Amino acid sequence: MTIFYSPARRPDDEAERQRAVDHSGFLDAGGDATLAEIVREAAALFGTPMAAISIVDRDRQWFPAEFGIGSSETPRTASFCAHAMLDPDRPMSVPDAAADDRFAGNPLVLAGPQIRYYAGFPLVAAGGQPLGALCVLDRVSGPAPTQAQILALGVLARRAIDRAAALR
């Protein structure tokens, strides 16, 4: 049996979205202590060993802050957050990535970090363009997030957007 995965499509307004990414402040925010704290809070909120602020750049997914992943970027084609940002008005959850056709053959599922659980809240620029997501990850599958977790993740996502804007 062959296992496939589906990289996220690029939004129709990709050029405008990329300009928003370039001007967001996130691409120069690596190592910021406030963003690192936001990521740790997200992981604690969900009880997961991994979390990140993921900015979907031209051909990569860049983590200006990450916890437990051990990498600062992955290819955009493997990005869960590139899927999440396609509906910037709604968080996305994947309780078991190995059982989800979009992700079952994804290299981030099959090899390191061996993602099984994902929840992400889109990071959206003031102009409405999606930049990426604040996400939590686990190596084991889990339940869909509670409404309280989603609301709290949304608050943390807003804090991340505000912090990146302050760093510009």
Image (spheres, grey):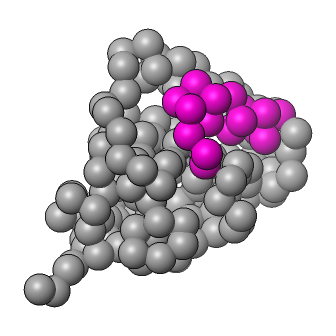
Instruction: Where is residue 122? Give x, y as percent.
Output: 46, 39
156 lies above or below 141: above
Closest to the observer: 83 or 112?
112
Residue depicted at 46% across the width and 20% down the height: 149
The residue at the far top in this view is: 148
Instruction: Where is residue 157? Give x, y as percent.
Output: 58, 30
Closest to the observer: 33 or 23?
33
Residue 58 in view, yes or no: no
Residue depicted at 78% across the width and 41% down the height: 36
Magenta: main secondary structure: helix
Residue depicted at 36% across the width and 19% down the height: 146
Instruction: Where is residue 10? Give x, y as percent.
Output: 34, 65
User: 105 left or right of 55?
Assistant: left
Q: Does the magenta segment cover residue 45?
A: yes
Q: Does the magenta segment cover residue 147?
A: no
Instruction: Where is residue 148? Give x, y as percent.
Output: 44, 13
Residue depicted at 88% across the width and 39% down the height: 33
141 lies above or below 35: below
Residues in magenta?
Answer: 34-51
121 lies above or below 61: above
Q: How many marks?
A: 0
The residue at the far bottom in this view is: 2
Q: Quarter of the image holding residue 156?
A: top right
Instruction: Classify the position of the N terminus by image quarter.
Output: bottom left
